[in-house]
Image (tube, coloured by chain):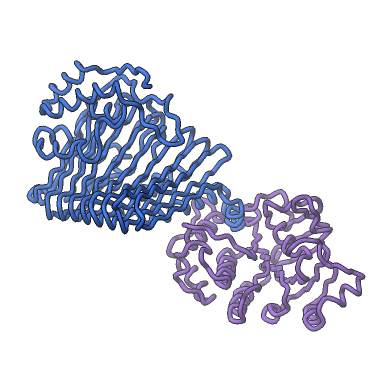
């Protein structure tokens, strides 16, 4: 079988008792790139956090499965080990832990005891990917995300993606705050990963990113649900016409679910 | 009011001990005087920790006699790890419980007039120099009950003297091994750097016993004379159950500098004091410390820099991790005396608590009696950020490993700045064991 399949069924998620996702259905297969678009506050980031297992988000009903495994029963680290990856909108800064030590721990955690990656091989791989992403090699020895600019943080998320080679990756607003050069580099990294063993869910406000990473499927989220799905042409129409036509079509007045995105 | 404490060792015992060890008269007299003073003095009062119920005075054995080590190959593995067994040009003292068990001082240093020997030999052979510094400048026997008790019962330690204009590149190391449950450490360390001299001194306190109810009452005096430089590194690693009073004091002369690099990794209850008195104009004190508290232990660390001279500079940087049900209190004091103009007192204390039951406190205190100075402090006490753990775990790192990374990360910025490579490596290893 080529690639894995992430299946989300009727997902309801609450934060601090307030329901944000109200029945999301989505299937992402290996080899496919999906984009979720939508205005601020419609639940896009909540979806990504719920898939990864963020401690503040509570899944109240529905299911998430990766192939035949129940993702909702897994701890956060087990989800990653199973093959999920989330490039975060706001990556944490961790003082005193170098980027290289962190990545090596992450790789070794997946490989398991007795099968650790050799230091030389690790350094070669990391150098190679950093060069590909046009990153300063010094960043390997800097503390994880500490003092990184917005663009450096996003590149660093893609570096992790490339080093960890997940089955399904979710990119949560990887394009926000990026200038056009950084955007091109980030897209180059994602396109490099493309292949039948890699599925990807891109969450974005902007069509701009999709000029560089062509999605197979485009979904629009409003009011905590996927309200419209289509091909790449949907993203282009959104770029040209905005979201109002969808709201009119569906009779939606306020698309948000009452929280900041 | 002082409560009556009956000591297990009386005047007759102390006198006969002095005789047995052939101590010079001044040393024996100092003991007896201190024993007498003990009665009138009160206990020290570390800020924010009640020590009334701690046992600092009741114990069975004053001296444990142990075999010396005929070679480094005989050392227990955990001690071997601390020393450079293969080094040819080593300056090393190892004390086993109370017995001077190994001593090596290179001919090069001997020829330069460097003194490096156990405290009793120093009293006999270098009495004049020792007398000048022994509890006269940095500490006094009559400060409180524990300093008096220490002076009366000193049972080990080391004396280091670097003559004028002698600069030593290689570290001088002392290792104090406790491998007997009954061994109580009344250790006295004196490091004197005379004018224009410099040295790096590294010491280890290590228990090879798992648990003991012994006592440690350790006094250290560092004297940096004019334009001298002392780098002082210590890794304390005494066993669970050992109640420690550890006081390391420095006196800095004109244009001198004392750097402290201390890792406090004791497993028992500990009262720790580190004070540097900046007497001379232009003198500098730099104190860096890392602490790991775990189990049920309570520890109190007071680090203090007192500015007497003009243009003096004091820095304190402390990071502590508190696990399980342990308590760690950090008191940092910068005191600028009247007349110490153009001085600068800085301190940073940070405590990271890893469990619901862990307790931490950081109290920065600045006492300033002079107008024309600068001073600053930063302190924080917090718990591990769940979002940091989430981020690390989202890359497949299990929670325990994620916590380990965060703890290392919290201590690393201090450990990496420690000026002594050896202390850095040793500490990293001890921390690794303790936070696993």
Which quarter of the picture shows residue B355? top right
Of residues B304 and A215, which is closer to you in this image?
Answer: B304
Quadrant of the rendering where the C terminus of chain A is positioned = bottom right
Residue furthest left as drawn: B111
Q: In the shown orientation, is residue A31 left or right of residue B381?
A: right
Residue ID at (76%, 72%): A37
Above or below: residue B308 compared with residue A250:
above
Residue at 28%, 26% (x, y): give it: B149
Taking the spot 81% from the left edge, 53% from the top edge, the residue there is A62
Above-or-below relation of A88 to B157: below
Query: Of residues A72 and A125, which is closer to you in this image?
Result: A72
Number of disc labels:
0
Image position, residue A218 (x, y; %): 78, 73
Give the chain ID for the blue colour. Answer: B
Q: Is residue B235 visible?
A: yes
Quadrant in the picture for the N terminus of chain A: bottom right
Give residue B245's quadrant in the image.
top left
Image side of residue B288 versus residue B350, left or right: left
- Residue A33, x across and y down, in percent: 72, 72
Please state the horizontal and vertical placement of residue B73, each as a whole percent of the image: 23, 40
**Is residue B289 visible in this depiction of the protein?**
no
Say above or below: B372 vs B86. below
- Where does residue B272 sit, x and y in percent of width and height? 36, 38
Which chain is in purple here? A
The correct choice, above or below, for A57 with respect to A38 in the image is: above
Taking depth in this image into account, of B68 and B406 the one nearest to the observer is B406
């Amino acid at each position: 079988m080529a690639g894995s399949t992430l299946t989300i069924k009727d997902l309801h998620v609450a934060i601090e008792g307030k329901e944000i996702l109200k029945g999301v259905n989505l299937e992402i297969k290996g080899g496919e790139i999906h984009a979720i678009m939508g205005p601020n506050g419609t639940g896009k980031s909540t979806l990504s956090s719920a898939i990864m297992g963020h401690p503040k988000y509570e899944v109240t009903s529905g299911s998430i499965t990766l192939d035949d495994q129940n993702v909702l029963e897994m701890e956060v680290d087990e989800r990653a080990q199973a093959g999920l990856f989330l490039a975060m909108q706001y990556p944490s800064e961790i003082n005193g832990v170098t980027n290289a030590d962190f990545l090596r721990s992450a790789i070794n955690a997946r490989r398991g005891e007795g099968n650790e990656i050799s230091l030389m091989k690790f350094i070669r791989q990391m150098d190679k990917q950093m060069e590909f992403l046009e990153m300063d090699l010094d960043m390997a020895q800097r503390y994880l995300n500490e003092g990184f600019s917005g663009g450096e943080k996003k590149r660093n998320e893609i570096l992790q993606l490339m080093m960890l080679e997940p089955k399904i990756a979710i990119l949560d607003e990887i394009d926000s705050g990026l200038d056009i050069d950084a955007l091109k580099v980030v897209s180059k990294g994602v396109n490099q990963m493309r292949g039948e063993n890699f599925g990807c869910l891109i969450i974005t406000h902007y069509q701009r990113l999709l000029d560089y990473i062509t999605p197979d499927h485009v979904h629009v989220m409003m009011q905590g649900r996927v309200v419209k799905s289509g091909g790449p042409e949907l993203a282009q129409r959104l770029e040209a016409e905005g979201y109002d036509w969808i709201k009119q079509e569906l009779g939606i007045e306020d698309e948000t679910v009452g929280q900041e995105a | 009011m002082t409560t009556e404490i009956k000591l297990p060792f009386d005047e007759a015992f102390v006198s006969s001990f002095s005789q047995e060890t052939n101590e010079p008269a001044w040393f024996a007299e100092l003991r007896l005087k201190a024993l007498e003073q003990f009665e009138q003095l009160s206990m020290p009062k570390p800020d924010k920790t009640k020590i009334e119920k701690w046992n600092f005075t009741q114990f069975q054995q004053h001296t444990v006699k142990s075999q010396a080590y005929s070679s480094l190959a005989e050392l227990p593995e955990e001690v071997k790890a601390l020393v450079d067994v293969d080094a040819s040009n080593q300056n090393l003292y190892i004390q086993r419980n109370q017995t001077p068990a190994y001593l090596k001082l290179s001919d090069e240093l001997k020829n330069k007039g460097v003194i490096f020997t156990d405290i009793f030999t120093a009293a006999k052979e270098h009495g004049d120099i020792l007398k000048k510094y022994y509890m006269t400048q940095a500490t006094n026997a009559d400060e409180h009950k524990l300093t008096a008790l220490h002076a009366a019962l000193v049972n080990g330690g080391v004396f280091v003297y670097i003559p004028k204009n002698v600069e030593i590149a290689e570290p001088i190391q002392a290792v104090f091994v406790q491998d007997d449950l009954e061994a109580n450490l009344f250790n006295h360390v004196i490091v004197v750097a005379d004018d224009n001299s410099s040295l790096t001194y590294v010491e280890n306190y290590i228990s090879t016993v798992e648990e003991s109810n012994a006592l440690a009452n350790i006094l250290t005096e560092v004297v940096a004379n004019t334009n001298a430089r002392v780098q002082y590194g210590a890794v304390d690693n005494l066993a669970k159950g050992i109640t420690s009073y550890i006081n390391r004091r420095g006196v800095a002369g004109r244009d001198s500098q004392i750097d402290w690099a201390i890792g406090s990794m004791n497993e028992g209850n500990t009262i720790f004091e580190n004070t540097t008195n900046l007497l001379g104009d232009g003198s500098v004190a730099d104190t860096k410390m890392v602490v790991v508290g775990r189990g049920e232990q309570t520890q109190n660390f007071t680090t203090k820099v007192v500015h007497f001279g003009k243009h003096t500079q004091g820095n304190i940087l402390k990071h502590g991790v508190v696990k399980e049900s342990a308590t760690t209190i950090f008191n940092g004091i910068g005191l600028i005396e009247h007349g110490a103009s153009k001085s600068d007192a800085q301190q940073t204390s940070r405590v990271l608590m890893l469990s619901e039951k862990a307790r931490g406190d950081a109290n920065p205190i600045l006492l300033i009696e002079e107008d024309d100075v600068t001073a600053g402090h930063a302190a924080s006490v917090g718990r591990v950020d769940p979002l940091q753990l989430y981020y690390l775990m989202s890359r497949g790192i299990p929670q325990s490993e994620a916590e380990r990374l965060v703890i290392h990360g919290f201590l690393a910025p201090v450990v990496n700045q420690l000026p002594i490579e050896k202390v850095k490596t040793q500490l990293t290893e001890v921390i690794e064991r303790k936070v696993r």
